[in-house]
Structures are given as structure tokens and as C-alpha cells.
Amino acid sequence: MPRPTRSIPQRTYKFPSGVGLSIRSRQREVLAHFDAEYGSAAVEKGGDADIEVYAGRAAISSSPAADTGMPAYQGRHKTVRWRTGIGDLSRDTTRVEFEGNGQLVVSFLQTFYLEPLLRLKFAAREHALVHAASLCKGDRSVLFPAGSRAGKSSLTLRHAATGHPVQGDNYVIVTPAGRTLAFPRRLRLYSDLPAASPDVFRLLPGRERWRLRLASLVRRFSLGYANLPRRLTMRQIVGADRICQEARLDSLYFLARTDGRDLTGPSPISKEDAVARMQTINRAEGARLREALAGRGDAAAVFEKTDRLERDILERALSGVPAFELLVPRVRNPTAIIAQISRLCGLGWG
């Protein structure tokens, strides 16, 4: 018989379009992590959740539903190991069990499994959760789809620091009507920020600058294994609420890394190409989820359906929206490049 769950502390979050996420854990640090990430979407009682998570050091072996035989997947990143079990994706509520140790393990649950699962649930409700920075000017937004470490966070921080609103540096929700909605998530700031973007680094509160310098030392002495980011809200960074909850999508600029010395572009691309690129980025972000579910027929069918639904949403959203590509050089200090991107994209600073 499944064991009762009433005694297990729970947090519930409700996102735009009504997608619900429930987190249960006996570990205080797990709940604190998700409150810090998604706290602005927290609700007291959200009804049935689209994703129900049971997380902790022994979450699978002591799960309230441990006798259901849900297969567990062994995951690893550098020195961190974990186990996760993911239920039937085609059900209204997808159950996730996750256990592991280490400071980073909860972040892997969020990044590798929960946010890719949220993408599936958003698509089922005619919203697309896309991997991009979204910066606003007035009532319109400019989208910057790109993979990790392409400059999205530095661009977002500089835009917010000049007094303009933003919707996020990593994820944004897109509707078929061409609206962009903020997705609540903290920014990740890495130990190389002082060297890579000293102007952005100077924006941070003094205690956060000190913590990033300490993180740089830890990374150096661990030979790169311990590269712990600082996770901060926009309010913590610039001292004011700079989140724009909703805007009209005005244009897209794909950021792609290049070995050249100069910023190249913008080069126009077609709507079809833009949609394909956005989905390619999304699939790359969900690679760990697909790996964990490899060989399961129900998962393959759901992924195929999600891709189809998402493609339709994006095609409708991007109708009449100009899309471009910017080739961004790899430079030690991208301050001048970031300002140039702002000028080219009409963001009003730089």
C-alpha cells in the first residue's frame, strides 16, 4: 500500500496557462531552493498538479508510491550522483521521484528534469516555454534565443541596470498570439563574471561580489569541478522590481558564438528557420530528460506530440515578427559587444 503523504512538507506553484508544480520533501533545503526559484508563483492550494515531485536523500526508496515499480535512472555530473524515477508522461499528473547528495543535486533536478517537463506541460496548454532571454522596451519584448553561456545573462543584467524591464535571462513563455510572459527563475552568475563582464559585476551588492570572488577561488583549487553559481533575483541584483510580466513580441535575435573578433549581423532568417532553431535549443536543454526516458514508448510519443504542438504555437506567435542572427565573438570582456547588441536591436541603451 502507498504510504501517506500528508506529513511530508509541500510547496505548490502555479505558472501562466495554469500549469501546476508540486514539490514534496522532508529536506528543508530542497523546499527553500524552489521557494527561491519560483516563489512568485507560489499558491496555497493549486488543485491537481501537472507535475508532482517527491525529492530527498532517499526519495525513491522511501517514496509514498515506492511499491509501484516506477523505473529509476542513475544520473551523474562530475562528482555528483543521483537517481530519478519519472512516471507516465501521458497522464494529467506526471510523478517524479528524485534522490541524491551534494550541494548541486537540487539544481540538477530543476534544470535537467523539471523545467524540460514543464515544457511538455506548457505545450499541452498552448504555451511554449522557450530557452531565451527576453528584454522589454515599453510594451514590447525582444527575444534572444541561445544556448548556455552565450551572453544572455550579461545582456539581461545590463538592460535592467539601465532602468529597463526584463522578463528573464534563461526562459520565457510564448503564447500563440505573440505575447511573451515572464517565467519566475533566478539568474545564474558564475565565478568568471568579474573578468568576463566587470561592468555587470560592479552592479552587484558588495556581499555578492565577495561571494563570487570566493567561488572563483574554490573553482581554481578544485580544478574546475566546483563551479558553483550565485543564484539571485533581479530585485537582489539591481535593488528594484524590474520584471515585466507580459509584453508583445517585437523581434528575435539568435545569439551564436563565433571565433571571429567582431560582432557580425544582424542577418535575417525565415520564420521556419527561427522556429526550427528555437526547438533545437529546447531539445538540447531537455537532453537529460530524454536520456532518462530512453526506450520508453510512452515518452517517445509524448516528445513527438510536444514538438508538434510547440511548432504550431511558435509558427503562430512568430507570424510577422522579424527574426535575425547575431554572431557573437568570444572575448574576455564582452562589455562593448553587449552595448553594440543593444544598439543594433533598438533596446535604447549602449
Image (spheres, rainbow, N blue to C red):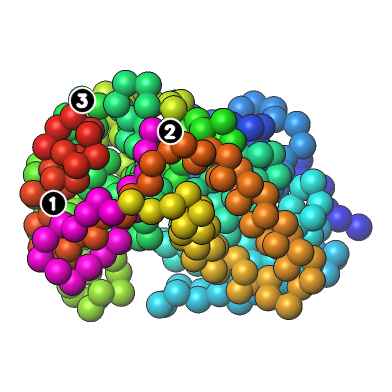
- The CA span between labels 2 and 3 is 20 Å
Judge by depth and name the residue closer to the eye, 40 or 176: 176
Q: Which residue is mark 2?
A: 249
N-terminal of the pair, mark 2 or mark 3, is: 3
Does the segment drawn in magenta span residue 227?
A: no
Q: Which label lies toward us, 2 or 3?
A: 2
The residue positioned 49% from the left and 41% from the top of the image is 318
Tell me the amino acid under the disc marked 2.
Leu
Q: Which label lies toward us, 3 or 1?
A: 1
Chief secondary structure of the magenta span? strand
N-terminal of the pair, mark 3 or mark 1, is: 3
Q: Residues within 10 Å of mark 3 (few under 14, many from 20)?
A: few
- The CA span between labels 2 and 1 is 23 Å
Judging from the image, what secondary structure is the residue with disc 3 in? loop
Q: Is residue 202 above or below residue 68?
A: above
Residue 291, percent from left and from top? 61, 74
Give the farthest residue toward the right: 1
Quarter of the rendering occupied by the C terminus: top left
The residue positioned 9% from the left and 57% from the top of the image is 333
N-terminal of the pair, mark 2 or mark 1, is: 2
Q: Which label lies toward us, 2 or 1?
A: 2
Residue 59, percent from left and from top? 66, 61
Quarter of the rendering occupied by the N terminus: bottom right
- The CA span between labels 3 and 1 is 19 Å
Q: Which residue is mark 3?
A: 163
Q: In the picture, residue 297 is in which quadrant?
A: bottom right
Q: Which residue is mark 1?
A: 337
Q: Which residues are magenta?
A: 250-267
The residue positioned 55% from the left and 52% from the top of the image is 115
